[in-house]
Amino acid sequence: MRIREVVEEDRNDLLKILEATGVFKKYEIDVADEVLQDSLKPASDYKSFCVVNEENRAIGYVCWGPTPCTSGTFDLYWIAVHPDYHQHGIGKQLLKHAEDRVREQGGRLMMIETSSMEGYDNTRSFYVRNGYKQIAMIPDFYHPGDDKIIYGKNFLS
């Protein structure tokens, strides 16, 4: 397996990954598709978009970028691995890859936003296991009963 930049031919694989997870709603997958398509444009804000490949197909991906109007703060926009490959360390490799690139770009802080819904329990545990701390919660953000949970990792401390 190797991590490389995303290409147009990855699109169907990436959308299948999101569908297979069973946690993303159709409109969320549509947003991910927009971000992917935008990342392929020369003037994109989403140039930091990488996939992990196995047997000529993408089985996981990560997308991150600098947070506008900040100094050294980055957002992790998306990270997903096909369920057939969960528990193989692929998500950890993708996250570490993104973190390493952020550090190379002078990043000092990585922020992640996610849902409080039960389907995201493993996702939230993954972030904590990888050194992220919950720093905020906004009740009923996505809809009643679905809070926004914000995690952060400071690379300087």
Image: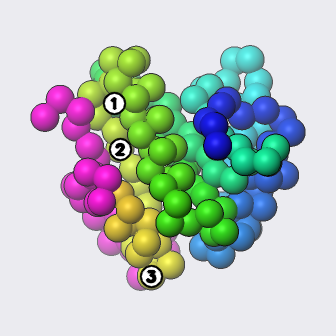
Q: Amino acid at mark 3?
A: Glu
Q: Is residue 76 above or below residue 47?
A: below
- Label 2 SS: strand
**In the figure, is residue 116 to the left or right of 39?**
left
User: Is residue 55 among the parts visible in the rendering?
Assistant: yes
Q: CA distance from mark 3 to mark 1?
A: 28 Å
Q: Quadrant of residue 103?
A: top left
Stretch in magenta: 128-157
> Is residue 155 inside the magenta stretch?
yes
**Number of the label disc, if any, that sits on residue 73:** 1
> Is residue 61 inside the magenta stretch?
no
Residue contact between numbered discs 2 and 1, judged by CB atoms under 8 Å: yes
Tell me residue 100's x, y (percent): 40, 29
The mark tally for this picture is 3
Which tag, 3 or 1, sits closer to the chain's start? Answer: 1
Tell me residue 110's x, y (percent): 34, 39
Quadrant, the N terminus: top right
- The residue under label 3 is 118
- The residue under label 2 is 111
**Number of the label disc, if any, that sits on residue 137:** none
**Residue drawn at the location 71% of the way across and 60% of the way down:** 17
Quadrant, the C terminus: top left
Tell me residue 150's x, y (percent): 33, 56
**Residue drawn at the location 63% of the way across and 37% of the way down:** 2
User: Is residue 115 among the parts visible in the rendering?
Assistant: no
Q: Residues within 10 Å of mark 2 (few under 14, many from 20)?
A: many
Q: CA distance from mark 2 to mark 3?
A: 21 Å
Q: Nearer the viewer, residue 11 or 141?
A: 11
Q: Nearer the viewer, residue 2 or 38?
A: 2
- Label 3 SS: helix
**Residue drawn at the location 51% of the way across and 44% of the way down:** 94
